[in-house]
Image (cartoon, helix red, strand yellow):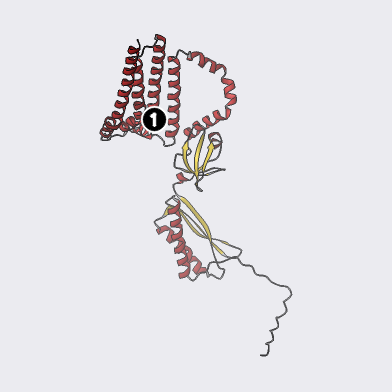
Amino acid sequence: MTELLLKQLGIAAAIVLVFLILRKIFVRYLFSLILKLSRRSPTELDTSFLTAFQKPLTTFIAILGVYVASLYLPLTPAVDVFILQIFRALIIIFIAWGLYNLISSAVLMQELSSKFNIQVDPILIPFLTKLFQFIIIALSITIVAQEWGYDVNGFIAGLGLGGLAIALAAKDTVANIFGGFVIITDKPFSVGDWIETSGVEGTVEELSFRSTRIRAFANALVTVPNSVLANQAITNWTRMGKRQVFFHLGVTYTTPRVKLQRCVDRIQNLLVQHDGVHKDLILVKFDTFGASSLDIFIYFFTITTKWGEFMAVKEDINFKIMKILEEESVSVAFPSRSLYFETPLPAATPTEETSS
């Protein structure tokens, strides 16, 4: 009896060892070959599928070896049934693991949208990814629970009875989820857009169930609850199409009318001919008699909305305006004030020279 038991234990150990060797061969040679062949495919979906299931599959090979080895052990029928239930539950977990990894890859969403010719907004990808991941986890837990004989229907009914209490306890979470749906429906911004609200300004990085992550210009990551963001006025600077520039150019009161008119005309012509200026609306007008200057109002839009290019266009125009003023011998005014005394001040006496 002891020899038979030792023989069975030896066979079981040998089976486990063989499967571990097969696992190593599969990872090092066979899987690498399959992965190399999949990269020749015109799409990246095959490669993403193999990469997602690599770890679950290699772990499953080791678990399969343990399960096959247990069949050669003198166990009771009850223990055999228990081991079988564990094995079947692990199969479900490994499949869910692979699908979870596959959903996490952005390639799947891109391939499906291109295959079915559906335009998916980039802001939906992280949101849908988390939604599908939640569904996969919920389904896998439900199937595993049913595998172990638990009544899932009773559990769901219990959730229905306690739904009011859960909703009251998690009202902020529910509000954030609905806020996320409002943002997705209205689409006030997308991932990568530069937005501004009353509390934050920066580039949108991610939209999740609970919050939206915005990268501020100071490179800090700001997390804003969706319920708060959905109820705020959002300025999307990325979608402005063109960028506004306006200012007053003040010149001295000694500037002759003819020269002032010539400056206005030349600045207008400069903006009309400039490649970086949008031609829809350009205003250059002698606007007001200011407190210490004659004010020329300049209003236009740049074609580019990118900050660096926008500043380059503004700089170029400013230099050219300075050149026009220099050529016309017109000076830029600065704030000044004249004081008049009702009683003249006494004349200053010259300082006596000291004898050497």
Outermost residue, bottom side? 356
In the image, is 8 to the left or to the right of 279? left
**Residue at image location 36% in from the left, 32% down from the top:** 108
Q: Nearer the viewer, residue 68 or 219?
A: 68
Evaluate whether residue 308 shows in this view: yes
The quarter of the rendered structure image containing the C terminus is bottom right
- Residue 48 pos. (x, y %): 33, 32
Q: Nearer the viewer, residue 7 or 208?
A: 7
Q: Based on the displayed image, in which of its 4 quarters is residue 52 positioned? A: top left
**Residue at image location 36% in from the left, 20% down from the top:** 66
Q: Nearer the viewer, residue 255 or 188?
A: 188
Residue 164 vs 253, above or below: the answer is: above
**Residue at image location 31% in from the left, 17% down from the top:** 11
Secondary structure under the numbered disc 1 in the rendered image: helix
In the image, is 346 to the left or to the right of 118? right
**Residue at image location 50% in from the left, 37% down from the top:** 212
Outermost residue, front side? 2
Three-letter amino acid code at disc 1?
Asn
Q: Which residue in the protein does label 1 denote?
A: 101
- Residue 75 pos. (x, y %): 38, 11
The quarter of the rendered structure image containing the N terminus is top left
Q: Based on the displayed image, in which of its 4 quarters is residue 145 positioned? A: top left
